[in-house]
């Protein structure tokens, strides 16, 4: 396990160095200023030694950094990745949902008004693959680094640019990706912990959602207007 | 190769609410009935049990119980000049599949429409003048009056064990119930659900404004209840997992809980699951449906099932699709206004809402049933004067919660970011301190809102998709703005710490956000065979042994959730079949 971690970290450093070098001719100032910061990554930037099902190393680093920016650690909960949200996303994209379950996939695929919903030929897995490449291209152009290498303020700014659709993704709007990323992040944070996210029921504790068994025939009367004070329980607690 | 099977007395297509009810009534009359269900079997023990029944991701988000768009979907365009594109992922509405259909995963609101809704066109003409109804608003009367349908509403409510409080008992107005409803012969089978904090705030605000609040009619039994079929419902646990979920407590009425156990035990009934009906074999000369062709989705083999009587009880879109691909009835043409199959497709002007936030009140949104809350009907139908308003119709308005499942339900004050530290703070602070007031607007027919066949996209059987040409229209937008003002008044009267601005339906119809699974029309009932598909007994004008069930027969959609009317019409039609048609098969109404 430890060996894997070292290998992956080295690989990521190598990838980042290669990127910086390639960009040097285009944007030397940015590449130079960013270079010294690269080795001193905050701990949360590094993907855990986790056996990813489908995400490649670059994607795992991006998703980990993204969910930690969307759900930062504070007194209310650990960070998104510490709650398992990156693991959740990996599993979802590797499984039926990621591979296009319940998605009508017959062509022709035409450009459409947003009110007609998702009209791309890509499965969610393929969509995230294309979008992470586009997102890192955007942050390298703008900040000189892959998204996961940015400091918190730049990550927030980069996500806001994507959210407003101004990150210039090829093929589809960056806001479409941001919305999908935010949606799957919130699913991971708030879903039952059996899916790998919401570790230790962190989000349920944060908001006061009691989870299971949700049998309140009597309690709806006794807790009228009162705070519900029982600790949350999940599917695994009853299995 | 198609295997032709031995003829049976009756075939029911789709084993949801209407298919189960018709199959039950027909077997009681002595017929041998085959039920063709495209989906899998579903049982409470295996499919709706703790703990997995509480899996929010699986059921509410990944859509476990719904129609799979890989098998079939619907395409949409906003006007006749556009190219329709398929709805690739369900969002705006969520049709069911599998035994029990959407009846296993609804919320349970069980309404009667208003007496004036039953005769909408003549009512509005009488009150506002013949020219008051715009030409493009192709509304009609239901050819069945409220008084005629009353015993059948009553029957369906007793089947479901509806919890509520009457507001009009045989003409006597009862404060605390819905004083606008038509006269009912009996009180609801169960007492109203336990009042929630959100409901109590709504009730006080509505009373303060001089409105008439009442508890919603809920097919979530407030106490253990045995229905006339001898089947026992449990008492509601207020678990907050109605819509999109099966009911673990057996308290939410469903075909699976209220009819099927009796039906499946009857040897005159045979259920065939994975039986995906492809088309009906129609003899135009004889004006009869001879048989039903279906594909067994487990093997791909095709079967032809001859039957004396055919009940079309699929969802709205499939009812229209099967009529079209089988060549029964004249397709509607919006240019000429001729033809009726596909005409008057309607939906619901829902999603009008306002969120109220109370710093000092615990809402406990997770303790709820799907039909929970306090309603007002003061702004519904024609319960208020529409002179000079520029629109017709209205909405029920509800204050309450139906769940606190946090993947989808996390209210935050206006201006809160969607993510990051400030989003977390607001979410933690307000999760249990807020709720919605919502309005479900009626949707009146429009000449250019209709269903036909898509020229490009096909389903898993190679048939064209149903193409929906639909948008909200002037009447809908004006209604929504009006409702926004009412919501604002109600919110203010609650004196909340904070409240959002009313969000009302504006812009094009979108397939993305959930609105309601209240799709109606396309095989409308009427008095004239030229402008309707089925007669007042839901019998096809073009094939006397074909009866079409469900909300596809509505000429337009009132504000009310359709299941109560769907159930009542199913019993009404079943009564006509068993007392009239079986004795003398032929048209029940002569054109």
Image (cartoon, coloured by chain):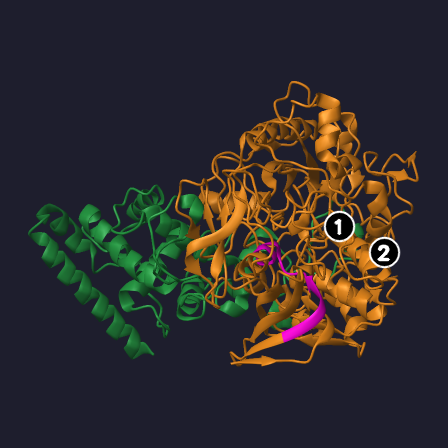
Foreground residue among A53 and B525? B525
Residue hosting label 2:
B158
Chain B rendered in what hue? orange
Residue hosting label 1:
B564
Horizontal and vertical percent position of residue B536 = 75, 48
Vertical position of residue B396 compared to residue B253: above or below: above
**Residue A120 in magenta?**
no
Residue drawn 27% across the image and 45% down it: A167
Foreground residue among B132 and A197? B132
Q: Chain of mark 2?
A: B
Foreground residue among B89 and B535? B535
Q: Secondary structure at mark 2?
A: helix
Question: Does the image show residue B365?
Answer: no
Residue range corresponding to the magenta coloring: B305-320
Please say if the residues under marks 2 and 1 sit with CB atoms less than 8 Å apart: no
**Residue B317 in magenta?**
yes
Relative to B231, is B311 on the left or the right?
left
Residue drawn 90% across the image and 36% down it: B174
Q: How many marks?
A: 2
> Which chain did the renderer colour green?
A
Foreground residue among B365 and B117? B117
User: For the residue carrying disc 1, how many other residues have a C-alpha within 10 Å: few (<14), some (14-19), or many (20+)?
Assistant: many
Q: Secondary structure at mark 1?
A: helix
Horizontal and vertical percent position of residue A125 = 36, 64
Residue drawn 45% across the image and 40% down it: B79
Q: Are marks 2 and 1 on the same chain?
A: yes
């Amino acid at each position: 396990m430890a060996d894997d971690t070292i290998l992956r970290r080295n690989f990521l450093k190598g990838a980042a160095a290669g990127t910086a070098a390639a960009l040097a001719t285009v944007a030397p100032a940015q590449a130079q200023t960013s270079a010294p910061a690269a080795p001193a990554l905050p701990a949360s930037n590094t993907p855990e030694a986790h056996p990813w099902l489908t995400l490649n190393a670059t994607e795992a680093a991006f998703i980990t950094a993204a969910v930690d920016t969307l759900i930062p650690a504070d007194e209310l909960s650990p960070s998104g990745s510490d709650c398992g949200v990156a693991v959740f996303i990996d599993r979802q994209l590797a499984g039926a949902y990621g591979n296009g379950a319940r998605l009508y996939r017959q062509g022709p695929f035409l450009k459409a008004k947003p009110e007609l919903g998702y009209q791309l030929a890509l499965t969610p897995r393929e969509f995230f693959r294309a979008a992470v490449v586009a997102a890192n291209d955007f942050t390298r152009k703008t900040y000189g680094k892959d998204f996961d290498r940015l400091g918190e303020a730049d990550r927030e700014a980069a996500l806001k640019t994507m959210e407003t659709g101004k990150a210039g993704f090829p093929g589809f709007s960056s806001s479409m990706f941001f919305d999908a990323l935010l949606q799957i992040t919130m699913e991971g944070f708030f879903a039952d912990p059996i899916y790998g996210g919401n570790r230790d029921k962190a989000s349920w504790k944060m908001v006061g959602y009691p989870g299971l068994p949700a049998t309140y025939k009597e309690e709806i009367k006794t807790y009228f207007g009162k705070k519900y004070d029982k600790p949350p329980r999940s599917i695994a607690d009853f299995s | 190769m198609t295997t032709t099977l031995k003829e049976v007395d009756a075939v029911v297509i789709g084993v949801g609410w209407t298919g189960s009810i018709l199959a039950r009534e027909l077997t009681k009359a002595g017929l041998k009935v085959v039920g063709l269900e495209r989906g899998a079997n579903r049982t409470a023990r295996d499919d709706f049990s703790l703990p997995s029944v509480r899996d929010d991701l699986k059921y509410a988000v990944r859509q476990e119980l719904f129609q799979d768009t890989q098998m079939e979907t619907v395409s949409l365009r906003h006007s006749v000049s556009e190219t329709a594109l398929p709805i690739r992922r369900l969002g705006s509405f969520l049709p069911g599949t599998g035994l029990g259909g959407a009846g296993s995963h609804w919320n349970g609101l069980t309404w009667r429409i208003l007496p004036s809704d039953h005769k909408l066109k003549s009512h509005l003409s009488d009150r506002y003048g013949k020219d008051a109804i715009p030409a493009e608003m192709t509304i009609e009367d239901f050819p069945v009056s409220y008084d005629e349908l009353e015993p059948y509403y009553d029957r369906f409510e007793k089947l479901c064990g509806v919890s509520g409080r009457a507001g009009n008992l045989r003409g006597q107005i009862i404060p605390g119930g819905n004083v606008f409803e038509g006269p009912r012969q009996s009180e609801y089978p169960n007492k109203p659900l336990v009042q929630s904090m959100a409901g109590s705030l709504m009730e006080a605000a509505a009373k303060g404004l001089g409105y008439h609040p009442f508890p919603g009619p809920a097919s979530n039994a407030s106490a253990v209840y045995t229905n006339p079929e001898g089947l026992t419902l449990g008492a509601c646990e207020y678990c907050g997992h109605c819509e999109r979920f099966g009911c673990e407590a057996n308290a939410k009425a469903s075909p699976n809980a209220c009819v099927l156990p009796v039906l499946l035990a009857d040897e005159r009934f045979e259920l065939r699951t994975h039986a995906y009906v492809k088309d009906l074999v129609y003899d135009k000369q004889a004006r009869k449906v001879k048989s039903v062709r279906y594909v067994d989705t487990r093997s791909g083999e095709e079967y032809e099932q001859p039957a004396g009587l055919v009940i079309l009880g699929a969802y709205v879109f499939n009812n229209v699709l099967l009529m079209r691909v089988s060549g029964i009835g004249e397709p509607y043409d919006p240019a000429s206004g001729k033809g009726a199959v596909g005409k008057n497709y309607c939906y619901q002007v829902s999603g009008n809402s306002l969120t109220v936030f109370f710093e000092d009140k615990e809402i406990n949104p997770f303790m709820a049933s799907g039909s929970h809350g306090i309603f007002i009907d003061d702004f519904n139908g024609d319960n208020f004067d529409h002179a000079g308003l520029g629109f017709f119709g209205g909405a029920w308005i509800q204050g309450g919660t139906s769940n606190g499942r946090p993947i989808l339900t996390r209210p935050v004050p206006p201006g809160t970011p969607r993510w990051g530290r400030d989003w977390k703070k607001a979410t933690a602070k307000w999760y249990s301190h807020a709720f919605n007031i919502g309005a479900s607007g009626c949707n009146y027919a429009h000449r250019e809102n209709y269903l036909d066949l898509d020229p490009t996209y096909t389903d898993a059987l190679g048939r064209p998709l149903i193409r929906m040409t639909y948008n909200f229209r002037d009447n809908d937008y004006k209604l929504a703005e009006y409702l926004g003002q009412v919501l604002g008044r109600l919110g203010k009267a609650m004196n909340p710490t904070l409240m959002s601005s009313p969000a009302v339906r504006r812009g094009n119809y979108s397939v993305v956000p959930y609105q309601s699974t209240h799709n109606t029309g396309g095989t409308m009932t009427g008095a004239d065979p030229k402008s309707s598909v089925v007669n007042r007994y839901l019998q096809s004008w073009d094939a006397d042994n074909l009866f079409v069930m469900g909300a596809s027969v509505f000429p337009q959609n009132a504000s009310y959730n359709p299941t109560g009317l769907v159930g009542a019409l199913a019993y009404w039609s079943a009564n006509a079949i068993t007392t009239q048609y079986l004795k003398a098969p032929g048209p029940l109404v002569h054109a």
